[in-house]
Amino acid sequence: MDNIQITGVSKERIRYAALTFFLAQGLCFSSWASRIPDIKDIFEVHYAFYWGLVLFLIPAGKFIAIPLAGYLVSKLGSRIMVQVSIIGYGLSLFAIGIASHIVMLGVFLFCFGVCWNLCDISLNTQGIGIERVYGRTIMATFHGGWSLAACLGALIGFIMIVMNVPPFYHFSLITCIILLITILNRPYLQEDVRDDRNIRDDGDKKGEKDKKGWFRMPEKILLQLGLIGLFALIVESAMFDWSGIYFESVIQAPKSLQIGFLVFMVMMTAGRFLTNYAYQFFGKKNVLFIAGGLIFIGFLTSSLLGEVFGSMLAKVIVNSLGFMMVGLGISCMVPTIYSFVGEKSKMPLGIALTILSSISFIGSLVAPLLIGGITQVFGIRYAYLLIGLLGLGIIVVVKRYLNPKQSTPQPPKGGVERMDSIY
């Protein structure tokens, strides 16, 4: 059963509308991430662990929003929640730009995290429904659109930094763009169709809905994918929140060469647009396996070889290569595990995604404090070396625990979709 109902509009226009909201979310996120070093300097935070506590408020907001997101998407539908959450996301970014005290910043970052997760759940619910309408894998291109916009946002942020534009004016511009996207494309979002799927019955009635009517045991596939997602979100946090600080403090690169976040986002974007092709050649399980290896090698390159060479240019190149490998490795993680949920889970999508998020977002909660604490005591190079070991963790989980039968690639009908069809 399709998860959304097509009502008088071509499915291409519906897909394009959903894509624009993924673009808006990616642009909003990367605008914040690109200015993290500047905001840290504005509030004169000199202790890494203290800054980790400040950043912790974002995943704390995301985690608190998990049950709220599942409830609201189930009750109000993804169409309404996509609009509400993306507007809240943009306004939270604007509020960060006007914060005048560290406490205000913390409150706005918490709100930013809440809206971020509401947007994640509602957008992916809408996206998976559209994927079912198409009858082929298109989630990777939605996430590719997110990455494309995030890459553009990183480039805009880099330009703003070089031109010494304050975050307030930068964030105000991005908020206006998000509001414009919402106004133009909101009519084409679709209402959800009621999804009454229950958990798969394994023969012992454990898959039936609990007698109380509300409790459901998580499927095994959700636990496996959730653990992979947990590792992936720690890696993402290390790159999203700390890559700019890494280039500033470890490499001590001038502003014109602080390109770590930018090159990471470029490769993350490229990887997401190549993900569908990788599925055809390797299968989804092997794609996750290879991605774990790239994450491990990338962090190893930056943390161990990043300061071997004497010249600044050589340091920038070596660390950029490491960041690029991490970007390519992490690019497929989220779209692949979401696609697995859409294909294999027998639970209602809103609930399945909420369970997946509940497990995965533990990584987001752990990451700021973990990285901040290690950085404070040993330095950020050692923090990155430890995070790189999670790439090996992903390999182990995929190899030993991800059910091969559940991971068999299912080629999209009509072959690999053209990447230019998302526009």
Image: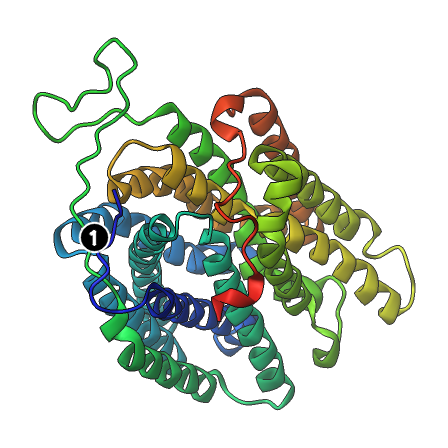
Q: Position of residue 344 (x, y in %)?
A: 38, 32
Q: Quadrant of residue 126?
A: bottom left
Tag 1: amino acid? Val
Q: Is residue 88 left or right of residue 328?
A: left
Q: Is residue 322 left or right of residue 65?
A: right
Q: How many marks?
A: 1
Q: Position of residue 83 (x, y in %)?
A: 25, 69
- The residue nearer to you, when weighing 59 against 268, is 268
Instruction: Please tell me which residue is depicted at 14% across the width and 22% down the height of the picture.
Output: 210
Instruction: Please tell me which residue is depicted at 38% across the width and 24% down the height of the picture.
Output: 220
Q: Quadrant of residue 37?
A: bottom right
Q: Residue furthest top?
A: 204
Callout 1: SS: helix
> Which residue matches tag 1?
73
Q: Is residue 300 left or right of residue 40?
A: right
Q: Is residue 364 visible?
A: yes
How many other residues sit within 10 Å of disc 1, few (<14), some (14-19) or many (≥20)? many
Q: Is residue 99 visible?
A: no
- The residue nearer to you, when weighing 7 against 222, is 7
Q: Is residue 28 left or right of residue 328?
A: left
Instruction: Please tell me which residue is depicted at 18% across the width and 20% down the height of the picture.
Output: 208
Quadrant housing the N terminus: top left
| Residue 168 sits above or below residue 410 on the image | below
- The residue nearer to you, when weighing 237 against 395, is 395
- The residue nearer to you, when weighing 123 against 294, is 123
| Residue 167 sits above or below residue 122 on the image | below
Q: How is the image coloured?
A: rainbow
